[in-house]
Image (cartoon, rainbow, N blue to C red):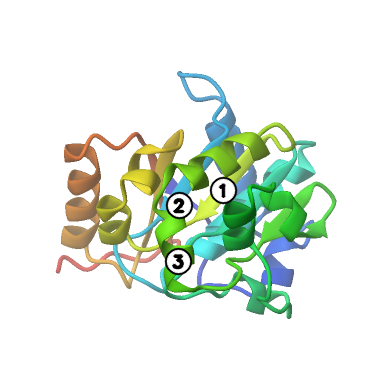
Amino acid sequence: MVDSGLKTVGEAGWILARGSALDGPFRELAESLLSLPGGPVGSVVVTSPEPKVGRTSVCLGLAAALATAGHRAAVLDCNLDHPHLHRLFGKPNFTGLTNAVANGKSPGDYGFEVAPGLLVVPTGPVLPEAAARMESDRLVGAVRAFEASVDVVLLDGPVAGEVLDSPVLSGGFDGVILVVHATRTSKSAARGATDDLLDAGVNLLGVVLNGSGQEMPEE
């Protein structure tokens, strides 16, 4: 389990700021991701046992660390039930990932740069037909093609149960990172989500702990 160093879910600007207290933990996380035994990964889904434990913060912090180290990184908002990445940067959600999938375009065409080498792509309009397309190989194709433009794509996904219900999110990419929180996630929930992902054959790359220095409740 990797400790992110995050105490709480921070503001986007603070997470992305160079020289912040989070630089070290996220740099270590980035180095771990780039030095996996199977080789570098191109696209990773980030999930958690429950909401509000810092998935998006981990995505942004990890992407910022990658970008600072000279790698091109992108964060894609794949949480169609609760789109929120655009709000962190005060942007509208008129276009985004759903448009890229629908139009056969690169997700990068619908994103915006928030730091040198770091691109953020919101969900875009969330309509019934958009949700159906996101559960198809079209999403995988769009992201895989996008990998030619960036080094690492982080998909800010929904909770683990929804990832497991989605063959595309659970098996269409290079792996999954599970984010848990020291006080908001119980040990049993963390173990349960880990076991469920592994039992489903998901390539679980690692577990990231938020809420540094605090004890996780048993239940």
Image mark for residue 106? none
| Residue type pointed to by label 3 | Glu
Q: Residue at x 61, y 69 (%)?
A: 124
Q: Residues within 10 Å of mark 2 (few under 14, many from 20)?
A: many
Above or below: residue 98 compared with residue 86: above
Image mark for residue 46? 2
**Secondary element at image label 1:** strand
Mark earlier in primary sequence (2, 3): 2
Q: Nearer the viewer, mark 2 or mark 3?
A: 3
Above or below: residue 169 compared with residue 130: above
| Mark 3 lies on residue | 129
Mark earlier in primary sequence (2, 1): 2
| Count of numbered tags | 3
The single residue placed furthest to the right in the displayed view is 116
Nearer to us in this view, 157 or 63: 157
| Mark 1 lies on residue | 154
Screen quadrant of the N terminus: top left
Nearer to us in this view, 106 or 113: 106
Q: Is residue 13 left or right of residue 104?
A: right
| Residue type pointed to by label 2 | Val
Q: Residue at x 44, y 42 (%)?
A: 137
